[in-house]
Amino acid sequence: MRIGKYESSDGMVGTAVTFLLIGLGVGAAVGLLLAPKTGRQLRKDLRRSCDDALGTVSEWTDEARDRFEKVVEKGADFADELRTKAEPLSDLLRR
């Protein structure tokens, strides 16, 4: 590595983002643990945060499932349409 010169780091962006997210998570956990709250209040806040996160993930999975079902339905409709359009051609080719 040269000092003062810019060198691109191919493939290092994903690693940097991963370490950033890990650092944010550790920082948030340490901040919660060192906050001036009682143990009961801290556990209550952690439980609420966990429930909120689980609710969000549940909403995302429901939305992803709905989108997937719509795509599968559209694909099936498209396949049926192609089949009906190709039937006369396949009958013609069989003769």
Image: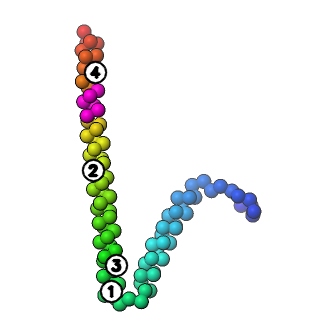
Q: Which residues are magenta?
A: 77-82
Residue 52 highlighted magenta (yes or no):
no
Q: Percent position (x, y) of residue 80?
A: 24, 30
Residue 18 vertical position relative to residue 94 in the rendered view, above or below? below
The tag earlier along the polypeptide, 4 or 1, is 1
Q: CA distance from mark 4 to mark 2?
A: 30 Å
Q: Which numbered disc covers residue 86? A: 4
- Kind of residue at disc 2: Asp
Q: Secondary structure at mark 4?
A: helix
Q: Quadrant of the C terminus?
A: top left
Disc 1 + disc 2, Cβ < 8 Å: no
Residue 50: assigned label: none
- Estimate the spatial distance between the alpha carbons at disc 3 and disc 4, rounded to whole Å: 59 Å
In this figure, which residue is indicated by the disc labeled 1? 41
| Residue type, numbered disc 3 | Leu
Q: Which mark is first along the chain, 1 or 3?
A: 1
What kind of secondary structure does the magenta stretch mostly adopt? helix
Quadrant where the N terminus lies? Answer: bottom right
Question: Toward which corner of the image does residue 89 lie, by quadrant?
Answer: top left
Answer with mark 3 or mark 4, whichever residue precedes in sequence.
3
* Residue at (52, 67) in percent of width and height: 19
**The disc labelled 1 sits on which kind of residue?**
Gln
- Which tag, 4 or 2, sits closer to the chain's start? 2
Find the distance from the CA under tag 1 to the CA under tag 2: 37 Å
Question: If you read the primary sequence from the N terminus, does the residue marked by circle 3 or circle 2 appear first?
Answer: 3
Q: How many marks?
A: 4
Residue 84 coordinates in the image, percent (x, y): 24, 24
Q: Secondary structure at mark 2?
A: helix
Q: Residue at label 2?
A: 66
